[in-house]
Image (spheres, rainbow, N blue to C red):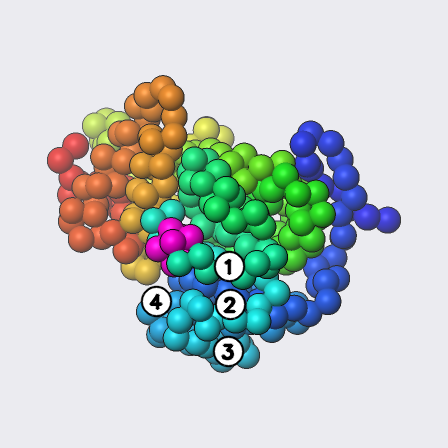
Amino acid sequence: MTTPFTVLGEILPKPPLAGRLEPMKIAFLGTGRMGTELALHLINTGHELTVWNRTKDKTARLAEAGATVVDTPAAAVDGAEIVVTSLFGPNTVREVVVEPGLIPDGVTWVDSTTVSPADAREFAAACDTYVHTPVIGTLGPARKGGLGVYVGTPDDARRAAIVELVTPWAQANLDRLVAVDSAAKAATGKLLANLALAVTIQGVKEALFLGASEGLDAEEVLTMLNYTGLEFMKNMKTPFILGERETAPGDFTVDAIAKDAQLMLDTSARELPAVAASLAALREQQELGRGDEDFSSVVVYRADTRS
């Protein structure tokens, strides 16, 4: 019996366990914090990985796990059966992949980079094997195989194959593995997920300000946020707010979510004032030198802002 997954509003069969694909030669480009976790899952399910990252030191964990490290993207994709990218944003994708025409003919390009729907359409037009696979979640769920994953392409056969490939990323909760009929739709799903993060971190910040105005300390406010719409974000960031964790290195950086918030504003046909307010707070943290720290910096250092 197979486990269902969602595609185009229908329920179709999906392999219930990771690792059913035969081992393949995979080029993996972009081994930052999230990319490393995604690549490790592919190694652990038997695939042969050749990896590249602009900062070579960030490939160390993958080299220890058995990956081959190379000095250029072209060397990584040479002989690859699949190319996976996990880069910082759409401009990096253009520079590394699209402009040099990096993807060999017929080789599937699996892109987990967070990009806008317009970017995804552009990349799909540039490479007919493009499959957009943005992931939802932070490093903790990534390590446990508990990410959400969208798999977007109009190619039914290619979509089914990549769903199977990325199953290890979502193995802990296969309901969060969602296949859609276009790369742009997958990109939209990822932006909607990160919109929720952006606006709720701003909500927690403002809740702390409101509570402080009535003499409540942070712990009291956080307790009062239980059973509210802000509970998820409050739970995620309480260790940072109460000083139990440092914001460096954190899980999801200020720079990353600020980049995503700008993609949201650029995509929407209407104004998004809540996203704009969150982006302003994130920009303040960037100006204070915290761009590479966890985005909980918005609430941890809430007094160190202009607002």
Report x, y in % for residue 259: 32, 43
Name the amino acid type tagged 4: Arg
Residue 34 in magenta stretch? no
Q: Are marks 1 and 2 in contact (CB under 8 Å)?
A: yes
* Residue to which mark 3 is pinned: 68
Residue at the spot x=32%, y=21% of the render?
Answer: 271
Does residue 23 appear in the picture of this structure?
yes
Where 62 sits versus 103, above or below?
Answer: below
**C-alpha distance separating marks 3 and 4:** 15 Å
The chief SS type of the magenta part is: helix
Does residue 295 appear in the picture of this structure?
no
- Looking at the rendered image, the disc whose residue lies closer to the viewer, 2 or 3, is 2
Instruction: Write the start and end of the magenta stretch as one range.
Output: 93-99
Quadrant assignment, res 119 = top left
For the residue pair 144 and 38, the one nearer the viewer reads as 38
Report x, y in % for residue 68: 50, 78
For the residue pair 119 and 245, the one nearer the viewer reads as 119
Q: Which mark is residue 103?
A: 1
* Residue to which mark 2 is pinned: 77
